[in-house]
Amino acid sequence: TSAPPARADRAPASKALFDRAAAVLPGGVNSPVRAFRAVGGDPLFIARAEGARLFDADGAEYIDYVGSWGPAILGHAHPAVIEAVREAALGGLSFGAPTELEVRFAEKIRELYPSIDMLRCVSSGTEATMSAIRVARGFTRRDAIIKFEGCYHGHADHLLVKAGSGLATFGAPDSAGVPESIARTTLSLPFNDPAALEAAFAARGGDIAAVILEPVVGNMGCVPPEPGFLALVIDLCRKHGALSIFDEVMTGCRLARGGAQERFGLRPDLTTLGKIVGGGMPLAAYGGRADVMRVVSPLGPVYQAGTLSGNPLAVTAGLATLERLTPALYERLEKLGASLEAGLRAAAEGAGAAACVQRVGSMITLFFTKGPVRSWTDAATSDTKRFSAFHAAMLARGIYWPPSQYEAAFLSGAHSEEDIERTIAACREALAA
Ligand code: PLP
């Protein structure tokens, strides 16, 4: 197979839009990873999406494994979700006053997440994690937090310390504009390292307000927790008067209806949700123990608010999505995931590539390193040049894989067995190219 042609030749409309975008948006995008800098080449501009398919500005069709970075678990433009949003829109877009929809949404989340007694709706995952940490600090009256290298929790100041995703991709350990005094309140530890966690608590246990983590990491590629690691986090927090925060913005409703905590049978003190719970609209939430959540204004002294929080259209899209998260959907995702995992692994072995495939449910990563990848140190040994070539070759074959080695790919209920077969065939060719 010959090398794929330069993308600009194949996608002139995208190229023209990217040129225009570059004049008005930094890097031509509204979120850095969309710029394809990690893999080179220009990004495709998307005109529309349906089911497991993306259609770009040039009319080309792709099998999508990004799923809007997680939300699209039912596939794009699910007719029932679209219809619900259309109907809600006719009743007004935003009121800035309470609605029954928000109550129904909160009740539904509480039903799916037994660890959540009370919650607050916000508009992005960043707001959810930022607010959960403020709540933890307000509740414990402590300032320090622990996070893990390679975990990404949005772009709040105190969470941009050795974060994964875009930052890992760009090789920057931190962001300009984050005051050192704030970064200093964040302790960054290696994921899956019980000894490091125990040592941190032994040294600073009385200062730590919270430990935040992705229970299955997606933002350094898919990295599952080692047995016992998540339970240790919860136990140590309890022992030292800190709060455990499971950031399930990505894993929530993806690894099970009740997220990673359902899958592993655990109960964190606080949970953050986003992506799927908003059904593709700007909606996220944080919640947990009632005694902790009672510190939130207007009940308590922790201030947090939002003009569009609990927006009726967003909550409607969320509810319509949550209602469709059936056991059959997760069985299907598991089956498709297992096929894709086996196919990618066989393709990599066939090509003699130093690679490993890691998957939990419908989150999957093909790492270009021998593996297993258990931490950011392991992930960072990946051959990102090889990944870039792989990404371009997949794109040329109609497969829209995440444009970074350090982003998990997602399956949806709209992917078919045939989609998976085509993807595996493309992978075999891409690795040979
Ligand atoms: N937490 C996790 C685990 C995420 O994956 C993300 C985004 O990818 C965020 C938080 C931030 O969410 P948002 O991009 O909606 O601000």
Image (cartoon, rainbow, N blue to C red):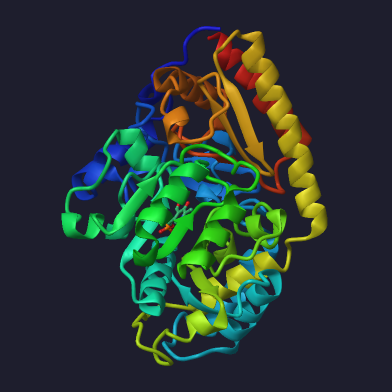
Up-down relation of residue 125 to residue 167 (above or below): below
Q: Quadrant of the N terminus?
A: top right
Whether residue 152 is visible here, answered yes or no, is no
Up-down relation of residue 274 to residue 374 (above or below): below
Instruction: Say which residue appears at 65% left-offset and 48% top-offset.
Output: 51
Instruction: Say which residue appears at 65% left-offset and 59% top-offset.
Output: 261
Up-down relation of residue 420 to residue 77 (above or below): above
Residue 299 appears at what percent x and percent y? 43, 92
User: Is 49 or 254 nearer to us in this picture?
Assistant: 254
User: Is 267 or 159 nearer to us in this picture?
Assistant: 267
User: Is 200 or 214 nearer to us in this picture?
Assistant: 200
Horizontal arrangement in the rendering, residue 237 relative to residue 111 (left or right): left
Residue 250 appears at what percent x and percent y? 54, 53
Whether residue 135 is visible here, answered yes or no, is yes
Instruction: Say which residue appears at 36% left-offset and 46% top-offset.
Output: 163
Instruction: Assign ligand 1 to one image quadrant.
Output: bottom left
Residue 257 appears at what percent x and percent y? 70, 61
Quarter of the view holding residue 32: top left
User: Is 429 or 267 nearer to us in this picture?
Assistant: 267
Horizontal arrangement in the rendering, residue 101 relative to residue 419 (left or right): left
Which residue is outermost to the front? 202
Q: Number of callouts in the render?
A: 0
Residue 216 appears at what percent x and percent y? 57, 47
Horizontal arrangement in the rendering, residue 424 relative to residue 197 (left or right): right
Instruction: Say which residue appears at 54% left-offset and 30% top-offset.
Output: 373
